[in-house]
Image (tube, coloured by chain):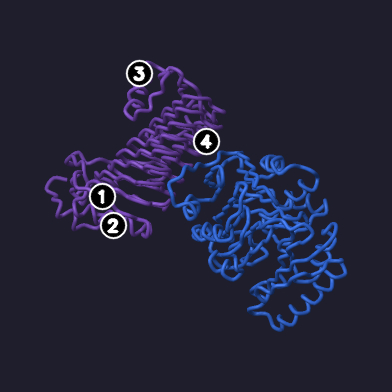
Chain colours: A blue, B purple
Amino acid sequence: MCGIAGLIHRGGRSNVGMEMTSMLQALKHRGPDSTGFAVYGPPNPGDYVMRIKVAERDDVDRGHGILDRIAGRITELESRLEHSNARIKTKETVTPYALRYVINHEGETEAMAKYVEEIEGVEILSLGNGLELIKDLGDAGEVANTYNLDEFDGTHAIGHTRMATESDVDIRSAHPYWAFPYNDVSVVHNGQITNYWIMRRQMEQKGHRFMSNCDSELLAVYTAHNLTNGVTLEDSLRSSIDEIDGVFTYLVATRDQLGMAKDTMAAKPLVLYESDSLIAMASEEVAIRAILPEEIDTYDPYDEEVRVWQA
Amino acid sequence: MAGMSDVDLQAMSQEERAKTLGMTTEQLTGRSLFVEFDADAEERFTYPWAADVDYNKRFELDTDELSSTQVNAKMRALMEEGYGTIVIKNPRGKHGLGVGILSRLNLIYEGSLGYFAVGLIDGPNVRINGRVGWSCAENMMAGTVIIEKNAGSTFGAAIRGGDLVCRGSVGSRTGIDMKGGTIIVGGDTGALSGFMMQRGRMIVCGNAGKNLGDSMYDGNIFIGGEIKSLGVDAVTAELTDIDKSWLRRKLSLYEMLPEKGVDHFTKVVAGKQLWNYDNLEPSEKKIIL
């Protein structure tokens, strides 16, 4: 089933970490397997926040000698960052398998990201000036507590509660997906993509990498491909309705935008609230009510509807 | 059910009671469906276990801290105590509120509801001063439900009777599989509205999305605005004087009659040209018609 949520403050900032936690906690019944957040803080030109995973949680719980291997991976990771002319400004070990780096790097980051991800067991969850992508097993409250999201000040966020259907219950299959290597772009999705393998092969032939077998990752790669080729977010969302088969509603966030698209059958839910200062959307109204208890007007976007909002 | 008292009925299991009351007489035999009626049955307009409520006895229930299950249980307890008017405060988009009410009741929600609101009801009058999520009033048998704002998709799915009214716009697949009753929408409706409709009437004062009335068997759909496209086997038909009279009366009842009247409405019915429509066994055709 899965639950998705998004919010964007127009021309202002708020505690989007806490707001998204409340929304996703209200959607817990739609997906208890994992929870993910893509939160956007104020952009910091020149500095990049890199959220990185060096093992799966299950590996840490069960793997023999895994902590030694993780230590080795981190040493190699930091060495590769140095060789890529990235200067580590801060390092935070959030869990034994998840780290947060703030790095200073000039120029393109794609080569650095690919070099880092060549390390076995290492996956960059997000890289960007404003984006921080956090995902883990458990409900929103647990994940937010572990990753100290309650005080995240920012402009917008998207989130996801996952009910695993066609792929594993692990962090690599959790949403949101970072649109590698396009900095600051993330995607959450509710639905099933039926031409996943055809589209995936097309994208792989164009040089894009996939880190999981989850169909939702295709939307992130598809969006990254379009944005890299100069397509606007709105046009990318529109073309996806024609090119991607299946039933889906998905949200895309960039450094300063939030967009949504709904498939041609309108088979997956989304409820939308829009005011001059805040836009909030979720699979169910109960999530919006979690942050806006007062009586408000909401509506369901129709089939093939595409919207993009600016922060 | 000559000679059967309410006490006897209440002592039965739910299955026995349903069969005794003639509510479960359908038996599937092969591909045919037979419905048998007991000619000796007394007329019965209420369920024997329905609470005897007084509309003038009113209760306001603040549901802010209650779960859906707790709210529904509390409502049933209030009806047992004879409360005939219940006002629900702070529903906050909770799912499944007010389902399965099988007796008369004035039910007022001060706020918005989530999925499956007031589904499976048979008799109450409901007013929702807010919005509803997906599948509002699914399988409704009788009564009235009025929503003051917008509604989500599959609004009035499979309803069999009563009036279901949304003053705002509704999502996709409105009235899917409806088997009776009336759905009235003040605004627009989404794609595939009236999909597999079998009976009943749907009025949409605004526009309709694509594939309107797709694969409908019977029933009437009236659209006041534009139709993006008709579905398979859905065709437009003449809006008769009887249709206009009925539209005026029905819309006036809920103060939703457009200023320009109803002459501009488009009527959509089943073309009955589906490949298998005339290939059904006689007994199946009887049920469908």
Q: Residues within 10 Å of mark 2 (few under 14, many from 20)?
A: some
Label 3 sits on a secondary structure element that is: helix
Residue holding disc 1? B19
Q: Position of residue B82 (x, y in %)?
A: 19, 51
Query: Label 2 is placed on what type of residue?
Result: Lys
Residue labelled with disc 4:
B190
Do the CB atoms of the residues marked 3 and 2 lie less than 8 Å apart? no
* Secondary structure found at label 1: helix
Residue B120: percent from left, percent from top: 35, 47
In the foreground, B47 or A298: A298
Q: Secondary structure at mark 4?
A: loop
On the same chain, marks 3 and 1? The answer is yes
The percent coordinates of residue A40 (x first, y second) are 66, 56
Q: Residue at x 26, y 50 (%)?
A: B18
Q: What kind of residue is marked 3?
A: Ile
What residue did someone put label 3 on? B242
Position above or below: A125 against B107: below
Q: Quadrant of the N terminus of chain A?
A: bottom right
Q: Amino acid at mark 1?
A: Lys
Q: Quadrant of residue B238?
A: top left
Left-right relation of A306 to B55:
right
